[in-house]
Structure formats: structure tokens, C-alpha cells
């Protein structure tokens, strides 16, 4: 019988972030939110970018899956507080939208190999 370990699978899916600063984060999210709904309301955009930058600099994990979960959860938190615009009412649809945005963010932050 094959043994399966979820923790081992998470540790195998690693990501390395490129070098960036807060201005680069703002530029990345500006482009992303121009293309995708939902987007962070303009009055909360700077706070969102600062929150994300803080997460990236404070959380020391290289697991891509964990980062996608963190990004998705962050979007849900902003949505729960009413800081997003253009989002769907259905949580299933939101989860798909947020997952797409999380994948795009990961692609923008990934270091070139």
C-alpha cells in the first residue's frame, strides 16, 4: 500500500519570490486589479498592499499552496469587511475568483528560474 502524506506534498510544492519592495507590490496589484473582479476599493488599496507586503516579509514559508491559501484568505477578509468591489454574492464563485487572483499573484511574485 502506498503511504500518502499531505505535509510532504505541501513541502514539495515550493516557491521562491523575486526581490521586491512596497512600490513593486503596488504596481503588481494595480495591474492585477485592472484585469480582474473583484478588486480592492481605491480607498483601501494602499492598506491592502501594505498588509500583503508585511505578510510576505514576515511569513517565512516557501510552500506555494500555503501562499495561495493565505492570499485567498486575505481576499475573503477584505471582502467580509466590505473593502472589495465587483464581487459575486455566492461564496463558491468568490472562492473561484479568489483562487484565480491568487494564482496570478503567485505568478507575478515568483522569481525567474
Image (cartoon, rainbow, N blue to C red):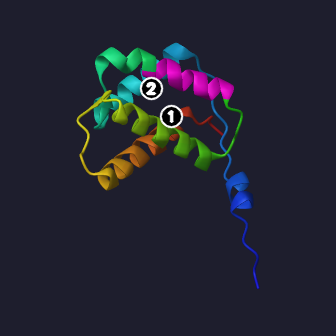
**Bounds of the magenta segment:** 48-58
Q: How many marks?
A: 2
Q: Quadrant of residue 92?
A: bottom left
Q: Secondary structure at mark 1?
A: helix
Residue found farthest to the bottom: 1
Q: Is residue 98 above or below residue 92?
A: above
> Residues under labels 1 and 2: Cα distance?
7 Å
For residue 108, which numbered disc appears in the image?
A: 1
The residue sitting at 54% across, 40% down in the picture is 70
Q: Residues within 10 Å of mark 1 (few under 14, many from 20)?
A: some
| Circle 2 residue | 28
Q: Position of residue 65 (x, y in %)?
A: 59, 49
Q: Secondary structure at mark 2?
A: helix
Dot 2 alpha-carbon crowd within 10 angstroms: few under 14, some 14 to 19, many 20 or more: some
Q: Position of residue 55 (x, y in %)?
A: 59, 27
Give whichever of 106, 55 is nearer the camera: 55
Query: In this picture, is 108 found above or below 12?
Result: above
Q: Are marks 1 and 2 in contact (CB under 8 Å)?
A: yes
Among numbered discs 1 and 2, the one appearing first in the sequence: 2
- On the image, the x and y values in percent for residue 64 come to 61, 46
Q: Quadrant of the N terminus?
A: bottom right
In the displayed structure, does residue 102 sit left or right of residue 45?
Answer: right
Q: Is the magenta region chiefly helix, strand or loop?
A: helix
Front residue of 85 and 101? 85
Q: Is residue 22 left or right of residue 33?
A: right
> x, y percentage for residue 11?
73, 52
32 and 41: which is toward the camera: 41
Amino acid at each position: 500500500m502506498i503511504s500518502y502524506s499531505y505535509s510532504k506534498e505541501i513541502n514539495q510544492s515550493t516557491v521562491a519570490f523575486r526581490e521586491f519592495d512596497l512600490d513593486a507590490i503596488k504596481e503588481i496589484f494595480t495591474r492585477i486589479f485592472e484585469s480582474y473582479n473583484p478588486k480592492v476599493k481605491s480607498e483601501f488599496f494602499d492598506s491592502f498592499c501594505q498588509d500583503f507586503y508585511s505578510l510576505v516579509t514576515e511569513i517565512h514559508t516557501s510552500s506555494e499552496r500555503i501562499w495561495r491559501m493565505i492570499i485567498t484568505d486575505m481576499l475573503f477578509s477584505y471582502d467580509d469587511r466590505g473593502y472589495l468591489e465587483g464581487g459575486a454574492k455566492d461564496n463558491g464563485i468568490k472562492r473561484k475568483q479568489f483562487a484565480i487572483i491568487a494564482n496570478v499573484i503567485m505568478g507575478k511574485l515568483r522569481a525567474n528560474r
